[in-house]
Amino acid sequence: MRQRDGAYGKIITFALFELHYMSTAAYQHIHMIAIGGSIMHNLALALHRKGLKVTGSDDEIFEPAKGRLAADGLLPEAEGWFPEKLHARPDAVIVGMHARADNPELLYAQEHNIPIFSFPEFIYEQSKNKQRIVIAGSHGKTSITSIILHVLQYHHRLFDYAVGAQLEGFDLMVKLTEDAPIIVIEGDEYLSSPIQRVPKIHLYHHHIGVISGISWDHINVFPTEENYREQFKIFVDMTPKAGTLIYNQDDEQVLEVCVPNNPDVHYIGYTIHEHKIKKNGKTVLKTKKDDVEIQVFGEHNLRNISAAKEVCKRIGIKGQAFYEALASFKGAARRLEKIGENGHTLVYKDFAHAPSKLKATSEAFKKQYPDRQLIACLELHTFSSLNKDFLPQYQGTFLAPDVKIVYFNPKTLEHKRMPPLDPADLKAAFGDDQIQVYTDNQALQEYLLRQDWKDKNLLMMTSGTFGGLDLQALANQITSA
């Protein structure tokens, strides 16, 4: 075990564990604690479809995980934790971050010396013989990973992957095979497991690493901006001899950690891809050969494309082959996704809550359609975004929309055991008295339906659900007029 002073204050120690490689073919039975998680249930399905016996438990499982697990016969008979499920002694236990350190099944596995893996440990252990490409960053990593996977699939390349969003053309979010020479991993900086409190990105041991941007998040784990930034510095320092580090050269925080000081590492900076925006709102990339019209937009996505292009170049897909595949890329699910349209109105939703994502998405939308008024709604849903000490990070990030709305659900604060939020404090933190604050999703929906949507666009941004609001039905009503 190696301790790195100052990385996590008193909360976390930085540890690396040496694992012994076993192919998935060597396992007969794997038990998953917190099987209902977004990425965990996808791993369960992937392993099950390879022929392994997969069992699991969770204390709550929601759709779509519930239905997908049920369809493959993997849905636990009852919610809760049952140590007796481990009496058959599985070959390994994979524990998700949703579980607690005192989880009864986890304690049983520890007491009986059953091998225990966090999700990133297991992915690394299964990809030791592959070239590992890890996409890290506070924002943009899902989109960059998605572009790379789309290009690889378009060109019929053999590859494994682990990504945090459902992608068009991909049944599962995880794929592990014996034959693929590479694996592309969306690298989350959040903690690996309740007993291994280190960022996931530290456990993949990348050969090619990407840092898309750094903007303080997860205040419940990284109490200061310096703590948070240090995790990416550790990631950079882990780049091996002859490895590659690809980084966003327009991000000041990234530049602080991506100092090209190791002569054995290839450092590649990227920026916004050269482009133009047509009058119909379509974005066209300028290339050495022909212009390429793409189906995504915004400066953040143009940077994401540049990052993906650099990765693909390193693995043998260059120039026109990359652009040929990119033309059919529609974007990652829930990332700036169009859910409604008519001749004078567009409705989009975006998986966004962090200040940097809010700023990038709202500015991109307004720039793409400058002749239309933009009404934008942000839901504060995460621990960080609902934390009064973190709220000042939103200062100056919500300036682009013509009408700005912030929604939060008081029940979410109660569930997270956080103090109530005062709308006045929220407006002060954002630095804008014109922001409208809603805590009732029905009142918010009624307000939106009362608007005249002629030459106006709507952008709904959240990592939650706006209290269960049916955004597709709302978009249909708005665009049916």
Image (tube, rainbow, N blue to C red):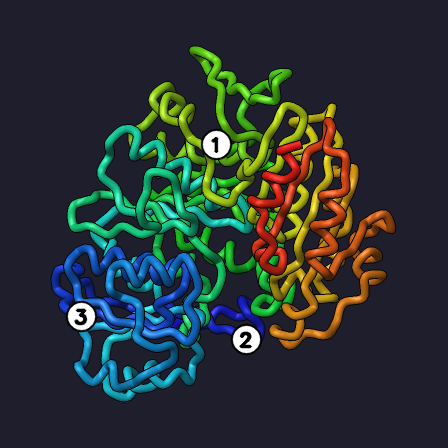
SS label for mark 2? loop
Mark 2 lies on residue: 11
Tell me which residue sits at (48%, 69%) in the image: 4
Q: Quadrant of residue 169?
A: top left
Sequence order check, earlier mark of 1 and 3: 3
Dot 3 corresponds to which residue? Answer: 29
> Which of the 4 quarters of the picture holds residue 38?
bottom left
* Viewer-closest of 247 and 358: 358
- Asked whether, in this view, residue 33 is left or right of residue 472, the answer is left
Circle 3 residues within 10 Å: few <14, some 14–19, many ≥20: some
Q: CA distance from mark 2 to mark 3?
A: 34 Å
Q: Position of residue 212 (x, y in %)?
A: 52, 43
Question: Which quadrant would the N terminus be assigned to in this image?
Answer: bottom left
Front disc: 2 or 1? 1
In the rendered image, the residue lying farthest to the right is 433
- Looking at the image, is 324 positioned above or below residue 350? above
Say above or below: 468 vs 401: below
Query: Which residue sits at x=34%, y=22%?
Result: 321
- Give the residue displayed 62% in from the left and 66% down from the top: 383
As shown in the figure, which amino acid type bears the numbered disc 1?
Ile
* CB atoms of marks 2 and 3 within 8 Å: no
Residue 293 in sight: yes
Element under disc 3: strand
The residue drawn where x is 85% and y is 47% is 434
Q: Decide which of 252, 417 is in the foreground and name it.
A: 417
At label 2, the amino acid type is: Ile
Mark on residue 305?
Answer: 1
Disc number for residue 12: none
Crowding at mark 2 (Cα within 10 Å: few <14, some 14-19, many 20+)? few
Helix, strand or loop for disc 1: helix
